[in-house]
Image: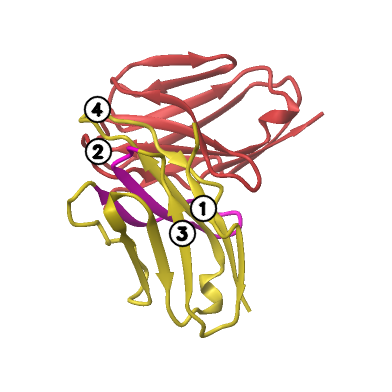
């Protein structure tokens, strides 16, 4: 089946720094999503992307749906300690098909 | 409104015992997923229910795993003859599928420990 390669696997940064992570797939996706998981909780949706080339922001978060429809990136600007967690990308090949998740990026922010 | 509810939040069981994990999705959501997450790992797809369609069971790791969804609402994931490698957090998620993607809403998971 389809696979998502997410990188980096982990990041250790200082508070105030910008962060970038990305996902690539072996097949074309119609939808890209980015989730964040805090310890002991389920993932929560951050940003959803529905069109190739789409660039969407949500506060300090910015995500883009790649033109080839096989990749997406998430940027976090001016990181703060509460940004700590695991970030997952997810993609949907066709409408109504099940999501495929990336392996996650563990983000640590040092105050 | 209420989110996805999972119970129990924690379960410790002895190797060889059967366990049942419960998921109450958001009311009206037609799609329901089960995922497994081992410590520090990503989300492993297990099974997907969509309305009245036959479930997508392609992610179930062995025939010891089964799931059902009664009345299009509550779902139960059953693991028979548990093994230590079954220890993980089991996450349930639901979405309202209307022909346009609707985001998944996750529960907080059931942490299963097999001793």
What residue is pinned by disc 3? B22
Which residue is at the far right? Answer: A111
Q: Which x, y percent locates residue B82?
A: 49, 79
At 23% from the left and 57% from the top, the residue drawn is: B55
SS for dot 2: loop
Q: Residues within 10 Å of mark 3 (few under 14, many from 20)?
A: many
Position of A4 relative to A20 (above/below): below
The chain ID associated with circle 3 is B
Residue A43, percent from left and from top: 52, 40
Q: CA distance from mark 2 to mark 1?
A: 28 Å
Decide: marks 3, 1 in contact (CB < 8 A)?
yes
Residue at the image position 49 percent from the left and 14 percent from the top: A57
Circle nearer the viewer, 2 or 1: 1
Quadrant of the frame with the C terminus of chain B: bottom right
Query: What is the C-alpha distance between the residues marked 4 and 1?
Result: 26 Å
* Image position of B44 (left or right of A91): right
Report the residue that reaches farthest toward the bottom.
B16
- Tags 2 and 3 touching, CB below 8 Å: no
In percent of the image, x 17 and y 51: which residue is there?
A: B53
Q: Which residue is mark 2?
A: A93
Q: Which chain is red?
A: A
Provide the chain ID for the residue under circle 2. A
Neighbour class for label 4 at 10 Å: few (<14), some, many (≥20)? few
Q: Which residue is mark 4?
A: B100
């Amino acid at each position: 089946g389809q696979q998502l390669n997410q990188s980096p696997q982990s990041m250790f940064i200082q508070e105030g720094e910008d962060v970038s992570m990305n996902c690539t797939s072996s097949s074309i996706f119609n939808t890209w999503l980015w989730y964040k998981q805090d310890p002991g909780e389920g993932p929560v949706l951050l940003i959803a992307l529905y069109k190739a080339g789409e660039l969407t922001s949500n506060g300090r978060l910015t995500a883009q749906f790649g033109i080839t429809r096989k990749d997406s990136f998430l940027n976090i600007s001016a990181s703060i300690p509460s940004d700590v967690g695991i970030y997952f990308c997810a993609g949907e090949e066709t409408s109504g098909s099940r999501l495929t998740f990336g392996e996650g990026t563990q983000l640590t922010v040092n105050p | 409104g209420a989110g996805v509810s999972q119970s129990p939040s924690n379960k410790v069981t002895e190797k060889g015992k059967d366990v049942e994990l419960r998921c109450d999705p958001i009311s009206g959501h037609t799609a329901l997923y089960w995922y497994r997450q081992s410590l520090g790992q990503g989300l492993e797809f297990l099974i997907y229910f969509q309305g009245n369609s036959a479930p997508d069971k392609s992610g179930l790791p062995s025939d010891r795993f089964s799931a059902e969804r009664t009345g299009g609402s509550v779902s139960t994931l059953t693991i028979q003859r548990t093994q230590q490698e079954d220890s993980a957090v089991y996450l349930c998620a639901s979405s309202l599928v209307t022909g346009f993607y609707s985001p998944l809403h996750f529960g907080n998971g059931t942490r299963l420990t097999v001793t």
